[in-house]
Image (spheres, coloured by chain):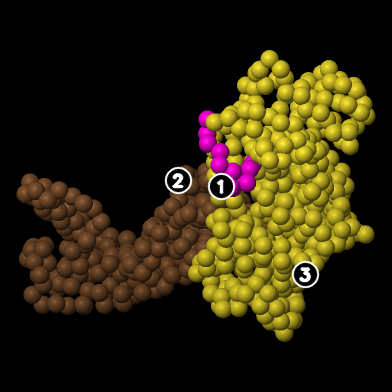
Amino acid sequence: MSALEIRNVHKTFGNTEVLKNISLAIDSGEFLILVGPSGCGKSTLMNAIAGLEPVTAGEILIGGDDVTWRTPAERDIAMVFQSYALYPSMTVRQNIVFGLEMRKVPKAEREEAVARVADLLQITPLLDRKPSQLSGGQRQRVAMGRALAREPQIYLFDEPLSNLDAKLRVEMRTEIKKLHQRLGTTIVYVTHDQIEAMTLADRIAVMRDGKILQLGTPDEVYNDPADIFVAGFMGSPSMNFIRATLAGQPGSYRLSVDVGGEQPLVLPWPEARETPALIRHVGEPVTLGLRPEHFSEEDARLGDQVEGTLLNTTTTVVEPTGADLLLRVSLGDSEVTVRLGPKSCVVAGEPIALRIDMSRAVLFEPETEQRLA
Amino acid sequence: MDNVIRRRTLGARMLRAGLYALLLVMALVYLLPLVVMLLTSIKPLEEIRAGALLSLPDSLTFAAWIKAWGTACTGMRCEGLSGYFMNSMSIAIPAVAISTLVGALNGYALTKWRFRGANLCFALLLFGCFIPFQVVLMPMARTLGWLGLASSTSGLVLVHVVYGIAFTTLFFRNYYVSVPDEMISAAKLDGAGFFRVFWRILLPVSGPIITVSVIWQFTQIWNDFLFGVAFAGFDSQPVTVALNNMVNTSTGVKEYNVDMAGAMIAALPTLVVYVLAGKYFVRGLTAGSVKG
């Protein structure tokens, strides 16, 4: 039985359709992340699950019960909001017990819940303070504590980290992950940050324009994207999309990329990644997707022992991030981003030799933007 | 010290001195009527007749205040303003409380439980702020008669509540718009219903706007004369009507000191409210506009 199941949910505001036939199901203990650019409908979907907004059509089931027309209070869910939404007139303790109090939980049990949650989140010294006396990170913890006190079936997190500064965000991210591993709770988490999605999720639903484009594990979404949008949205720096022409036949497909010179760059397509669809696109333009880490610096000592095609080009920009070196190199009349190790000594404007690893490359249909191989 | 860097030349300083002198004179002019009232009210009648309006009293006396409170004649009766003062209190206090509470509920419903037509509803309520008192006199008289509340304190309370709701709703609606919706959503998820959210979450953060509403309504209702003179019975007249009767009485000697003392007594409650809560008034009016 699924902890949460969404069946053919539609939502319209006036004439605009915000959610278009959304269906998904997650198991108990799963961490689902809804990710997408702003306006993709992820927050609307979250509000629909919470019961804060009615859906136009479709059903929502929590723990097997149809809750589509139940009020938020009747759904056995807890939510952590982006602005934390703490009650300013109450102390931290009162904030945490409010939900239990409304549900008429006996006082002794309430005290117990506060102690447990405060201990878990290390907020015991803050219990008698007002939210206005807390820092951003502390408020975040209290907001999570309020959700955890009730032990509902599903936790909803609505961009909970986006109001924190960069360092704190990474810390809290780890903490949420630890918490999930320890408590085994079912979580639905909305974010527009693809790194949060990759690091936290058991499964990711990438959304755009009210539709789920792909629902899969972080590995699937990253390495096996369903279309150009998903491929470009997940990963930073983003995937390089290169115009190419498909040639050859099953068993020996090739891609030729115009690099400005007399001879095009020819990249053999790995046999292991062939699909039956390719045969219909021979001789036609396709979009080749290569992630920055699919490039590596040519090492003369290894020679031809390494897999991959050699590419001689020039660097236009060098961006050292500390851990990595990001390069912009020219490829014909366009540029691609390349990620190299920090020890590479590359100078902008100088020629460079790179190896392209095609074993994880992906191919898309340029018109429909759908995946070909 | 104010927090401004300004030029320190002689000319600039002179200009500043001139500016302060002008402001001081204007303040004095503005305060003069109050000073005259106060001085007159604590002088014996003979000194007033001598004609020196601004001179300090030779012999200080509170007889006029005592008379205005307890024995001055208001029309036929000579029991002073005390009874009418209490009438005003028993009109103003419930009317202020009810109109503030209803305004808060309206503002809450209009902003946090948005229903179809909420904006139209608010626009119509807002329209109520622009209806002059005189326009409703006749229809209101009929309504009070029909309800059996004519010439009663409850009738006056009703009139003031009805008239005040437009303003209090406006205050609370604009204040609650700036309260984050997520806070209400969180309370709903926690299991609180319409009234629980209002009592436990919203009212505790409404301090500034409650102050605004109370000051505004109290001043309006306490100072009202027209509704008081039109709808009050003989026993429920507010202090403003009684003051008018006392000052305009055509019998006997004109006791300026008693008149002034009476006017001061009638104005005192609103003054007290302003002094006690005035700073919250400004704070409440600007709350939300600058808050981050």
Question: Residue B7: x and y, percent?
Answer: 15, 48
Residue A183 has which mark?
3
Q: Which residue is mark 1?
A: A321
Quadrant location, the N terminus of chain A: bottom right
- Between B138 and B1, the one nearer to me in the picture: B1
Provide the letter of the chain coloured brown: B
Query: How would you rate the neighbour count of disc 2 (Cα within 10 Å): few for under 14, some for 14-19, many for 20 or more?
Result: few
Q: What chain does mark 2 sit on? A: B
Residue under the image location 87 percent in, 35 percent down: A273
Q: Secondary structure at mark 2?
A: loop
Q: What chain does mark 3 sit on? A: A
Q: Main secondary structure of the magenta part?
A: loop
Quadrant location, the C terminus of chain A: top right
Question: Residue B252: x and y, percent?
Answer: 21, 67
Q: Which residue is mark 2?
A: B132
- Between A203 and A69, the one nearer to me in the picture: A203
Q: Is residue B268 left or right of residue A24?
A: left
Q: Are marks 2 and 3 in contact (CB under 8 Å)?
A: no
